[in-house]
Image (tube, helix red, strand yellow):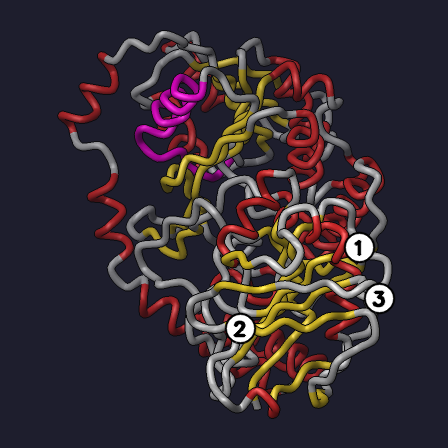
Amino acid sequence: MGKIMRLGGRGLRYIKQYGLARLYRKIMERRRRNAAEAGYNDWLLKQLPDAEEDARQREKKFAYEPCISILVPAYETPENFLRQMIDSVLDQSYGNLELCIADGSPSDKVEQTVKEYEKKNSRIKYRHLTENLGISDNTNAALALATGDYVGLLDHDDLLLPGALFEIVEALNESDGADAVYTDEDKVNMELTRHFQPHFKPDFNQEYLRSNNYICHFFVVRRSIALEVGGFREEFDGAQDHDFIFRCTEKAEQILHVAKVLYSWRSHEASTATNPESKLYAYEAGKRAVSAHLARTGRMGTPQNTDNYGFYRVCYPGVPSILKNSFEKFDGQTGVNVVYYGKVCNISVTINPEDRYVLFMHVRNQRQKHTRVNAQFYEALKACCDRPDTGLACARVYDARKRLAGDIRMRGVKDPFSDGMKGLKYGYTGYNHRAVLQQELEQPTDCFMVRADILKTCVPEGGEVSVETLATKLTESGYHIYYEPWAVLYEG
């Protein structure tokens, strides 16, 4: 009854702020995704190493075998959770590790359990703090215990899945030693009997990281970088991992994504993994982390909350801070040359002297005159284009049925339970809300804008080029394909 009342209270607050229709869509999307992932638990078990594979991994000798220090800030961790966490680390097939636990508990319950393990395993390093310093400084205390080449972040009630460190070290060897590595993750119930809600992530995508802390766990970084950036900062408690990951990835030259589920969040009522409203302060701290990152990297922009906790929208200069839901007929605009292209995806470009931007639109039918755009369509795309590292600024495009045209695809996502966002209905946000989040794309959407001066450098005057070739030329020149979801177009 208590859980129902809590859910009902959250639902009423959501309706009051965003309306009943949005709540309905939110519920339907979660149900559909849960239905799509109905076989996930069995699928995951087949992906994990069996006894034969575990033995092979234990016998494997890598050319590079770094020590990985697992950092765990503990605080009154229930004994069964603590033991399961410790076992998940010590049972790893790759053995060159150390488990560094900093305990801020006022009682000695955690200490008693850890000391029991410590007597049997020299890879455990433990410190009982004289007082609880908070999540950031407790983690810094664990970092101070570490002597490994890399450090990895593990919450005190979560689990590393079998083979996790083996996969990390294998990736490091294949890359000749990257600076940071992260993996996919999922959630597990209290009894560890069912895994659910996997998070299949893209390859490193800084624009997407500004929208949300998609990296989160399992994150491993060179210890030298962790120390160089100053560890964790208490002013970002609640989003200390987001802030730390920003600062580490800003320093890292190579960041790897291991597209395998290797970390499990334990999901219980007090955890943000199940109840996002249990830590509203964390999402405000996340917004501050995004702001600090923008300032450090010399980018002008202000992060805003969205109607999904922990997901942000960055308002870059020129982007309207207040979004309007009104749509209007698509008309040209001074300084914008509109170019239509067809099924063959070849585009012929003639740039007029007065053109500052070129807008490319894929024509699917003869109803183009009924195309409509939202009120901030041009402003949002222009603002995105005006960022110095933008190659293509892509709009969110719907067909005449108000379903997402094409796909929104980030590089490196391996999701066996979904075909992406093709055909997503207008008003729905998609997997992890990606349809409405700023991100770097692998390929452009069916409507995108380019600055005329940039276009001239890669397309000969009056020449013809395919969309794919244009995108490739721009990315090879160091530009990015950015998705600006607040510029919306649909064929009415």
Q: List x then y, in percent, for residue 381.
A: 73, 65
Which circle marks residue 362 in the picture?
2
Q: Is residue 345 above or below residue 84?
A: below
Please tell me which residue lies in front, 470 or 155.
470
**Helix, strand or loop under label 1:** loop
Between label 1 and label 2, give the one nearer the viewer. Answer: 2
Q: Decide which of tag 1 and tag 3 comes sooner along the chain.
A: 3
Q: CA distance from mark 1 to mark 3?
A: 17 Å
Residue drawn at the location 63% of the way across and 65% of the way down: 448
Residue 246 painted magenta: no
Viewer-proximal residue among 423 and 279: 423
Mark 3 sits on what residue?
354
Local SS, label 3: loop
Looking at the image, residue 172 lies above or below residue 340 = above
Dot placed on the residue nearer the N-terminal end, 1 or 2:
2
Residue 22 point in image, percent of width and height:
59, 81
* SS at circle 2: strand
Does label 3 or label 2 sit earlier along the sequence?
Answer: 3
**Residue depicted at 53% across the width and 13% down the height:** 125
Quadrant where the C terminus lies?
bottom right
Circle on res. 386? 1
Q: Specify whether 232 is left or right of 222.
A: right
Quick one: 173 or 114, which is closer to the camera? 173
Q: Amino acid at mark 3?
A: Glu
Q: What residue span does the magenta drawing correspond to?
A: 156-175
Residue in the picture at 69% in, 25% down: 251
Label 1 Cα neighbours within 10 Å, binned few <14 / some 14-19 / many ≥20? some
